[in-house]
Image (cartoon, rainbow, N blue to C red):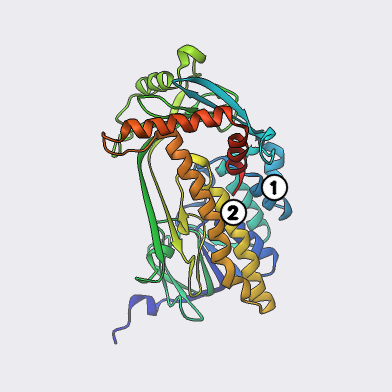
Amino acid sequence: MTESRYDRVAQDSADVVILGAGPAGLVLGNLLLRAGIDCVVLERAGREHVRTRARAGFLAPNTVRILERNGLDEGLRRRGQRHGVCEFRTEDGRFRLDYTSLGPCEPHTVYPQQDLVTDLLASYLDAGGRIDFETEALAVRDADGPTPAVMVREGDGRPGRWRARYVAACDGRHGAGRRSLPPGAVRCHHRDHGVSWLGLLAEAPPSLDAVGYAVHPRGFAGHMARSREITRYYLQCEPGARTDAWSEDAIWDELAVRMRAARYGPLLRGRIVRRSVVHLESDVLEPLRHGHLFLVGDAAALISPSAAKGANLAVLEAEVLAHALTDALAHGRPEALEHYSRRCLAHIWRAQEFSHWMVRLLHGTPDSEDSAPFQEGLRRARIAALRTSRAQQDWFAENYVGV
């Protein structure tokens, strides 16, 4: 048999090889390190990119509790901002929900993901954690055996290989973890919601003291504060639209129309520093493992951003997996690893159900023209129930903050 180039390179090893230095990978790395488990994080991007890439910023109460009980909340306690109000703007007027007084009476904490990642990275490195930046995981081999191998391309382009007892794929839906699953190893349940958003990050103070959800005949618009100087906006657009299809003035004008600024007050404008097109789709893989390869975060399940669940699920799954790996490696008890998939899928499907409900609440259903009036009637009925029914408001609050 011809020897491959991977068979000729030197091997590195760790008990647990973690793919990806996002919230899932870094929470997992910190918890394993503190339990005395030999681990390494492999990250394809450079350190500065990892520290500055902007993502979600709403942390659920359970996420805050996980960070607190594991001593990973120092920055969060100093700079996180409590948030607990949603404002809905529709053709029938506007209403606000203070969800800290509804359901479980718990708030979100606004803390930009890049700040959380910076904190987690500093904690991991300060404790002596190993991380290889600019190291791209290409494939996971022999995941169904006792010592899987992770094939990588290092920063200088050379091939490399890591041996492990377990591999945690925290590298997203397009990462090596998912790509390495053999046909039939897992089932993938997929849903295309038929909706796209233009995601915008603006150097502008928040225009209202709430998360704003605007439903308009021309499409959805959303307002989410990130800090006192930065606000994230969303603008529903045609699927397949280019990020540069709109000028800045056109974007602000359209946001003003859909958020009914003439009626409820002007938007505070500023320079738009980042744009992306987000196509709303969801998927769930079952089970969340193949042999000694475990899927975490977006590698396990993709969820639409309509309810801010993705990063919160990732942190929850990382804690569950960290405890299970510690039981297996430090105490010789592998039973918890057998339950990892079942435990996490219960949370994932709950979050998917609420996210799907939010998509339908904000956009209706992109069905045929014949059914559009019916679907629009259902959407307005959902909003009316959320406006008037305390039971519906309590249900919303419980699921909005819950994972």
Q: Position of residue 335 (x, y in %)?
A: 62, 75
Q: Residue at x 40, y 34 (%)?
A: 363
* Residue 186 occupies quadrant: bottom left
- Label 2: state its secondary structure: helix
What amino acid is found at the position of numbered circle 2 in the picture?
A: Val
In space, the residues marked 2 and 1 are separated at their CA atoms by 13 Å
Q: Say if 347 sits above or below 224 in the image.
A: below
Q: Residue at x 58, y 41 (%)?
A: 400
As rendered, which of 371 and 291 lies closer to the eye? 371
What amino acid is found at the position of numbered circle 1 in the picture?
A: Asp
Q: Residue at x 60, y 24 (%)?
A: 209
Residue denoted by label 2: 315
Q: Say if 264 sits above or below 216 in the image.
A: above
Residue denoted by label 1: 73
Identify the residue at the far left of this view.
Answer: 369
For the N terminus, the quadrant is: bottom left
Question: As drawn, is 401 to the left or to the right of 222?
Answer: right
Identify the residue at the far top of this view.
Answer: 262
Question: As drawn, is 301 to the left or to the right of 118?
Answer: left
Q: Position of residue 42 (x, y in %)?
A: 50, 62
